[in-house]
Image (cartoon, grey):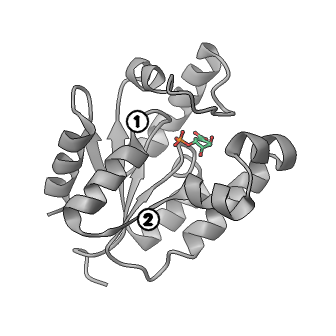
Amino acid sequence: MSAATTPVFLVGFMGTGKSTTGQILARLMGWDFIDLDDQIVAAEGRSIPRIFAEAGEVYFRRREADLLASLRGRSCLVVACGGGTYAREAGRRQIDRIGRAVWLQLPLETALDRCRDGTVRPLLRDRAEAEALYRLRLPSYRAAPLHVDLEGLSPEAAAERIAALLQ
Ligand code: S3P
């Protein structure tokens, strides 16, 4: 598959706008868009907090992995990942085999502010835990081949910057 059409995976911490930016980016590029969390919720017929509460995180990660595996061979596709997808070594390997990961980079404070959007995130319980998780995950996000600093950028400007980076 040509590098020019290889799927693009938006990765990064919760609250970095992977879904919103991803939809705009896909529109700009004329590509398909999928949101991993939305796909899992639709397939399961229950919300992410319910999946975590009723089946556990390990089950949720297995669903993520199955979904990623099903994307092999696709082209012209933008994928909004969950915050944990690229943070796990197995997820990182899967994504790096299938396409290009772009880390949407934001300081923790800004990401947490943006998480106050009414979405219930089971792994975002309190400030100390969020900070520990963020620190733990940074080296994984940094391993992404492409990075975009989102500080001060609207989702539209972020999508344009990513599109330029992918040229
Ligand atoms: C998770 C982030 C969430 C969702 C799930 C787990 C994580 O997605 O996949 O709650 O492990 O960081 P967002 O990053 O879109 O909030």
Name the residue located 24 percent from the left edge and 69 percent from the top edge: 30
> What residue did someone put label 1 on?
16
Would residue 100 appear left or right of 164 to someone viewing this image? right
Which one is in front in this view, the residue at disc 2 or the one at disc 1?
A: 1
Q: Is residue 145 visible?
A: no
Q: Is mark 1 within 8 Å of ligand 1?
A: yes
Q: Is residue 164 visible?
A: yes
Which element carries disc 2, helix, strand or loop?
A: helix
Q: Position of residue 66 (x, y in %)?
A: 65, 69
- The mark that comes first in sequence, 2 or 1, is 1
Would residue 58 appear left or right of 126 to someone viewing this image? right
In the image, residue 114 sits, relative to residue 4, either above or below, namely above
**Residue 35 — which label?**
none
Q: Residues within 10 Å of mark 2 (few under 14, many from 20)?
A: some
Viewer-proximal residue, 41 or 158?
A: 41
Q: Residues within 10 Å of mark 1 (few under 14, many from 20)?
A: many
Viewer-proximal residue, 105 or 112?
A: 112
Name the residue located 59 percent from the left edge and 29 percent from the top edge: 133
Q: Is mark 2 within 8 Å of ligand 1?
A: no
In the image, residue 151 sits, relative to residue 71, either above or below, namely above
Residue 50, quarter of the rendered image? top right
Q: Quadrant of the N terminus?
A: bottom left
Q: Residue furthest right?
A: 54
Which amino acid lies under the numbered mark 2 shown in the image of this protein? Answer: Asp
Would residue 93 appear left or right of 33 to someone viewing this image? right
Q: Position of residue 161 (x, y in %)?
A: 17, 47
Which element carries disc 1, helix, strand or loop?
A: loop
Name the residue located 82 percent from the left edge and 40 percent from the top edge: 53
> What residue did someone put label 2 on?
96
Q: Quadrant of the C terminus?
A: bottom left
Q: Position of residue 56 (x, y in %)?
A: 81, 46
Which amino acid lies under the numbered mark 1 shown in the image of this protein? Answer: Thr
